[in-house]
Each structure stands twice: as structure tokens, then as C-alpha cells.
Image (cartoon, rainbow, N blue to C red):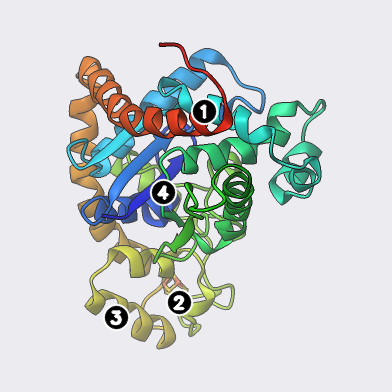
Amino acid sequence: MSRIFSGIQPSGELHVGNYLGAVKNWVSLQAQFESFFCIVNYHAITVPYEPDDLRRRTRDMAIGLLASGLDPKRCALFVQSQVPEHTELAWIFNTLTPLGELERQTQFKEKSGRQEQVMAGLLNYPVLQAADILLYRADLVPVGEDQVQHLELSRVVARNWNARFAPDAPFFPEPQPKLTPTRRIVGLDGQAKMSKSLGNTIGILESPEAIWDKLRPAVTDPARQRKSDPGDPDKCPVIYQLHRAFSPPETVSEVEANCRGAKWGCVDCKNALLAPLLAELAPVRERAASLEANPGQVDELLASGAEKARVVARETLHEVKVRMGLPEQR
Ligand code: SF4
């Protein structure tokens, strides 16, 4: 069975963009692949943060992932800092990664521009990302189209290490992207990808009232100034994409006909979205409430996920150290 690895930032509660763009896909992939899903809290500390807030966000993310359907019996769901082999392998890869490769990374250029003082961890972030993936010798990494280039450095690292320490038979596979079927989800402002830092999200655990308060003012086709103006769903970046994701096909057809034919106003259209959206999220909210009421259960699930991941992580690191002439503690 091929292996997949994917990581998610501990940004707190999952939003509809994470849910559709990644997590829903992970839930179906866990049945087809040997799956490792990691909450990447070491990545989160490369920018300023508060420890208590990070602890809370990590826990909330775990609850969101479990409530969305990640099943600890079918996958390894764990927190990065509970598997120390990630940072050990990252150090090893740092010694094989040219500085120029890191300085060229677009993520570094973007994020460093926003910081007063740039720490080395931000520059080395992609090396840790490579270690995350290669530690499990993952064949595939589920990503959106906009993240494909981030995988390239992991392939370069695998190639460099193999060339130096496993020239005859590559030890690390060069991980390939497995494209997520859902295109990137636009935020409620209609401008950019849904992202917590931009404040344009719908949280999957928000109450029905809070979700409606966010949907109601969401931007639509700007040509529709009044109900009698015909619209074009393809120019409606937020609501139409959510209908296609959550509504049954007959409702999507109705949206198209009633928007183009000016039979529905945008509030009618948003109302038609609310029911299927809430119906899909209701069981997720129920499971999350039950996990929140049992904090010990979440800790146990994460600890056993980390143990499952460590079985593979230790094996990989052992082989790496043997080949590199690095003695281990017995
Ligand atoms: Fe968007 Fe629906 Fe309004 Fe058409 S009717 S512009 S699809 S919200």
C-alpha cells in the first residue's frame, strides 16, 4: 500500500476552506493509503506566537480533524512535537541543503517581508517540511495546485541524500503531489483564498446563526445590483463554489437557472445553501462537542497516533544514521 503524508498548521478551529480543500479529501484517502496526518506545531513557532494560544490551537485543530472523520484506527494522526525524529532528520537535511535553495523559496520571501526580525527557523522551514514527508518515506503528498512547488525542495533533498548515501538503490522515494480534487476555496471577501489570518472564513464548528451572519453579506456577482438583474454564477466566487461543494446537483442546477434568469435574489440563493451546508456540518459539530467534553480522550488519541508514527520514524532515522556513520544511543 502506498504511503501518504500531509501536514496542517495548528491554526485552531478548522474552517470551510481547510475542510473542503484538504481534510475531506484526507478522510477518503485514509481508506486507500497508509496515511500519516500531522499537526505541524514546529512550523507554527517560526513566527511570533503565545504558548497558551498555540496549545489551545493545536488541541482545537486535533478536535476538528477527528470530528471531520479522521479515524485513528485507519491513519496516524499526531502532533509534530510528539515525534522528535522530525527535527533530528531536519538537522541532518540542513547539512545537505544549499543556502541558495532556501533563500529562493517564495514562502520565505513572502513571510520574511512581514517580520521585523527574521529568524533562521523561517529560512529552514522547507527543510523541516522535507523531513516531515521523507521521515515516512511517503510516496504521495495530497496538496492543492498552489502548493505543488513547495514539494520540489523535498524532492531535491531526497535526491541529494540518495546520491550521497544510497547511490545504488534510492532509500528515499521522491514524493509526488496528489492533487486535491477541490479547487482552492475563496474566502467570504471574494478576494483571496479562505484563510484565518485574513478573517474571511466560516468555521466548521460555528453555530448556524453565526454561519448565516457571515453568509448573508458575502460578496456575489457584482453585476447583480437588484433581484431583476440577471447574474452569472461563474462570476460569483463565494456562494456558487459553496453550492457546488455542499448542495445536491439539482440545487446547483436551480442556482444556475435562477441566477441567470433573475428568478432568485442572492439572499434566496444563500438561503438555499444554508440547509445543505448545516446538514453536512451538524454531525461534525456533534462529534466535536463530545470530544471537547472528554479532553483526556483527545490526549490519548494523539499519543497513540504519535506512537504509531514513531514506529516508522525510528526505522527511517535508524537507517539514515547507519548510512551516514552516526552512532545511536543503545
Ligand atoms: Fe451568486 Fe446565487 Fe447571487 Fe447568482 S444568485 S450571484 S450564484 S449568490
Q: Residues within 10 Å of mark 4 (few under 14, many from 20)?
A: many
**CB contact under 8 Å: marks 1 and 4:** no
The numbered mark, 2 or 1, whose residue comes first in the sequence reads 2
Residue 29 lies left or right of residue 239; in this view the side is: left
For numbered disc 4, what is the local secondary structure?
loop
Tell which circle, 4 or 2, labels the residue nearer the N-terminal end. Answer: 4
Rounded to the nearest angstrom, the CA distance separating label 1 from label 4 is: 19 Å
**What whole-number distance in Å separates the C-alpha atoms at marks 2 and 1?**
67 Å
Mark 4 or mark 2, whichever is nearer to me: 4
Callouts 3 and 4 close, C-beta under 8 Å: no
Q: Which quarter of the frame holds ligand 1?
A: bottom left
For the C terminus, the quadrant is top left
Q: Amino acid at mark 1?
A: Lys
Badge 2 element: loop
Q: Residues within 10 Å of mark 2 (few under 14, many from 20)?
A: some
Q: Residue at x 44, y 52 (%)?
A: 17
Q: Is residue 217 above or below residue 198?
A: below
Q: Residues within 10 Å of mark 3 (few under 14, many from 20)?
A: some
Foreground mark, 2 or 3, reads 3
Q: Name the kind of residue labelled 2 in the image.
A: Lys
| Residue 134 in the image: above or below residue 169 | above
Residue at the (50%, 57%) spot, across then down: 218
Looking at the image, is mark 1 or mark 3 nearer the viewer? 1
Closest to the observer: 188 or 195?
A: 195
What is the x, y in percent for residue 150? 60, 52
Q: Which residue is mark 2?
A: 227
Compute the Cα span from label 1 to label 3: 60 Å
The residue that disc 3 covers is 254
- Distance in Å between CA atoms under marks 4 and 2: 51 Å
Q: Which of the 4 image quadrants contains residue 242?
A: bottom left
User: Percent from the top left, x then y, of residue 204?
Assistant: 34, 43
In the picture of the structure, the residue carrying the numbered disc 1 is 321
